[in-house]
Image (cartoon, rainbow, N blue to C red):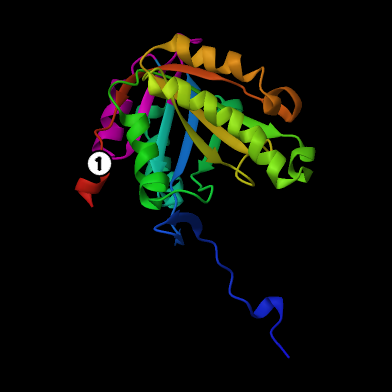
Amino acid sequence: MNSHTEQDVELDLAERGFAHGKTISLNRRLFMRFAAYTGCRDVGPIVAALQQAALDCVVYADANDPLGIGLLVASEDPALFVGELRTILQSQVCAELQRRPEYDTLGRTYSIGYESDLEETLLRKPVRKVLDERNHWAIWYPLRRSKGFQRLPAADQRRILAEHGTLAKRYGRGGHATDIRLACHGLDRSDNDFVIGLVGPQLYPLSAIVQEMRKTEQTALHLESLGPFFVGKVIWRSQLGVRDAHE
């Protein structure tokens, strides 16, 4: 007779993948924080402070606000957001900035279960996408699925999500756009489920993806909210791997 209770079983929080015919796991993930500000008349001192701190980050010019900027910062250690980044944002160089809290998002990378290289999926690929010099434009937004979606059979969920996967592949094959998908359960002030970043060389394909998504079953029937949308063009980005070189 098994005398172990559920409390005796060690909790396994690792992400799962599949390679060489067996399940693989990795208990690491990347956190990404996006925030938007207005009142920025000179981005130079802010960029200099970020560059000196050697953060993996991107600064965007807000397409809908002539004084607006967006800031995307990535770190495997979320303590960076309340440490180094917090110090920079409290410094004199950022004194002119006015935070736009409706755009605040914090998300984490996750695996689906079939990935063959978890370090690539969870840690390297998302940073490479946002720091890629070819990706000049970005749209960042949160989304929340309806509670009913979680009650659907697993097979139905996979079918519905596969429609979005096909859409992403079509745009990705031509180099028009790529996406970063982050889970934000319990990390978002508005109870959103995911943060999405669409990045690419031109703005139009990113808008076209959102337009096509409206027709998918997930967006049309199983979303409670989508947005707000931040639309920006890269002003400055750190060099790929710059943080690793400083550690």
Question: Residue at position x 46%, y 13% from top?
Answer: 205
Amino acid beneath label 1 = Gly
Looking at the rendered image, the quarter that the N terminus falls into is: bottom right
| Secondary structure type for disc 1 | loop
Q: Extreme front residue here?
A: 21
- Corner quadrant of residue 57: top left
Which residue is nearer to you in this view: 87 or 69? 69
Using the rendered image of the protein, determine whether residue 98 is visible from the camera's viewpoint. no
- Corner quadrant of residue 141: top right
Instruction: Work out whether 27 lies above or below 218.
Output: below
Which residue is nearer to you in this view: 170 or 43? 170
Q: Position of residue 65 (x, y in %)?
A: 49, 10
Residue assigned mark 1? 241
Using the rendered image of the protein, determine whether residue 84 is visible from the camera's viewpoint. yes
Q: Position of residue 74 (x, y in %)?
A: 40, 40
Question: Is 118 on the left-hand or right-hand side of 112?
Answer: left
50 magenta-colored = yes
Question: Residue at position x 36%, y 31% from top?
Answer: 129
**Residues rendered magenta in the picture:** 41-70
Question: Residue at position x 38%, y 13% from top?
Answer: 41
